[in-house]
Image (cartoon, helix red, strand yellow):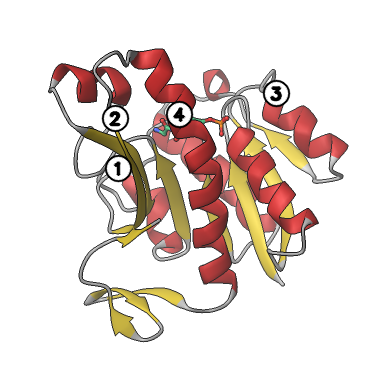
Amino acid sequence: PLRIAILASGRGSNFAALLAARERGELPVDFVLVASDKADAPVLRLAQSAGVPTTVLDPRQYAERRAYDVALFDRIGASKPDLLVLAGFMRIIDGDALKPWAGRMINIHPSLLPKYRGLHTHRRALKAGDLEHGASVHYVTAELDGGPVIAQITFPIEADDDENTLAARLLPMEHQLLPAVVELIAAGRLALSEEGIRLDGQILRKPLRW
Ligand code: GAR
């Protein structure tokens, strides 16, 4: 099975969705590590109760981002993952630290990329008067939230939506999207090449829609 390491900073509902998909027999993967930058992140308890090893690296113990990222990825590398999944990891990662993982690291982001990289995506979609919103899963590159987009899930924004209602509608959709993409990777159907993302060997011209 595909060996997966998770990086997460918080609640861990996306990791929970991956665990649940595996429980249902839909995801032939092993979770080899959950790594966090926050010692009190609920995702760590979730991992422990599922018997998944955890590790915490506190950025405050490091003088600079680069040193932190080197230590983090050293530790992650030691568990020999095939794939790194950023599931609510809320730190920017140094480009050099990412390089060895090119094509082997994905992130879920709560916007329809390339719209709204970074934070406050729901607020920004509302402010822009967007008619739809959604989430994206993309390969991670040195450009923040800027790597090739694999798949997106979308839904209409209603007139009375606010940040909270958007977040509440989006989250369960994220929980479908992320396991679906991981399933494609586990099945060996997705790869990142020089020319772009390949699905079943064919270049993907636009993100898959869920
Ligand atoms: C999710 O909405 C995810 O898309 C977002 O954080 C939340 C994590 O929730 N990620 C980012 O904003 C990445 N920049 P979770 O901890 O319950 O999975």
Instruction: Judge from the rendering whether residue 36 lies leftward or rightward of residue 155; answer left or right.
Output: right
- What residue is shown with label 3? 42
- What residue is shown with label 1? 145
For badge 1, the amino acid type reads Asp
**Contact between labelled residues 4 and 3, with CB atoms less than 8 Å apart:** no
* Residue 89 shows in this picture: no
* Mark 3 and mark 4: Cα distance apart in space: 21 Å
- Is disc 1's CB within 8 Å of ligand 1? yes
- Is disc 2's CB within 8 Å of ligand 1? yes
**Residue found at x 24% / y 47%:** 146
In this rendering, the label closer to the viewer, 4 or 2:
4
Instruction: Judge from the rendering whether residue 169 lies leftward or rightward of residue 96; answer left or right.
Output: right
Q: Secondary structure at mark 2?
A: loop
**Contact between labelled residues 1 and 2, with CB atoms less than 8 Å apart:** yes
Which disc, if any, is residue 169?
Answer: 4
Between 139 and 98, the one lying in front of the other is: 139
